[in-house]
Each structure stands twice: as C-alpha cells, then as structure tokens.
Amino acid sequence: PNLIHPNAIISSEVILGKEGICIMAGSILEAGTEIKSGAIINSGATINHDCCIDKYVHVSPGCNIAGNVIIEEYTWIGIGTCISNNLSIGRNVTVGAGSIVISNIEKNFKVAGVPAEKIGLNNE
C-alpha cells in the first residue's frame, strides 16, 4: 500500500503510483506532480507543480524541488537539497546533502555542493 502521513499536504491534482509510496509529515506536493511507485518523500520536503518523481526515488527531509523538474528512477536527493525549476536529474544519481542544483544532471553521477558539481560516478 501507499503510506501517506495525515499531515502531508497533497494537491488533488497529484498523481500517485499504485504501491509502495511513502509520504511523510509536513511534505507538500503541488498540482500536476506525479509520484511513481516506491518513491519516498520525506518529512518537510516540498515538490512544486508539474514535477515527475520516478520509481524508487528518495527525496530526503527538507528538500525543495521547484516546478517542472524530472527526477528519474533510483535517484537519492540528500537532506536539505534545493533543485531549481525546469531541470532533469538522471537515473541512479546521488545528490549530496545541502546541495543547490541549478543544471541538469546526467545518469549515474554523484554531485554535491553549491552549486552542485560532479564528484564521481555511481555504479549501475
């Protein structure tokens, strides 16, 4: 089943996958966003309009994701990260805690910093 904390704020126009989604307390999901199966949206994360959070993505506590962002499957977004609008984060990416993402990130990279820069590769 999907597990959604009663203190999460979810627009009626959000599309949720059928199973395994976990949305924690204080999370805010805006209109036009899609959260696919197996994703975790942790405490206090905000996901703005028209985003797509793919399968098995983990959005850590306190992350802020602006509008029209695509995050592909198996990606981990570290605590307190901010992602600017109109960006794409590839499959199997790790974004370090507190990073500020202002450009697209290709699949299989580790990034961190302000602004976020490539620091290594993730194994597939």
Image: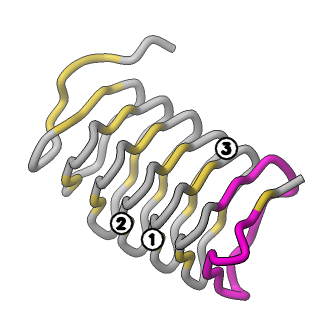
Residue 112 coordinates in the image, percent (x, y) = 20, 36
Residue 70 coordinates in the image, percent (x, y) = 48, 57
Query: Residue visible at 71% across and 68% down?
Result: 5
Find residue 64 and name its label: 2
Q: Earlier in the sequence, mark 1 or mark 3?
A: 1
Image height of 111 relative to 11, above or below: above
Residue 45 coordinates in the image, percent (x, y) = 46, 64
In the picture of the structure, the residue carrying the numbered disc 3 is: 55
Whether label 2 touches label 1, CB < 8 Å: yes
Three-letter code for the amino acid on which mark 2 is drawn: Asn
Q: CA distance from mark 2 to mark 1?
A: 5 Å
Query: Residue visible at 19% across and 29% down?
Result: 118
Q: Taking 106 as reference, is 23 left or right?
A: right
Callout 2 secondary element: strand
Asked if the magenta segment contains residue 21, the reply would be yes
Q: Nearer the viewer, residue 103 or 37?
A: 37
Callout 1 secondary element: strand
Q: Residues within 10 Å of mark 1 (few under 14, many from 20)?
A: many
Q: Magenta residues?
A: 4-23
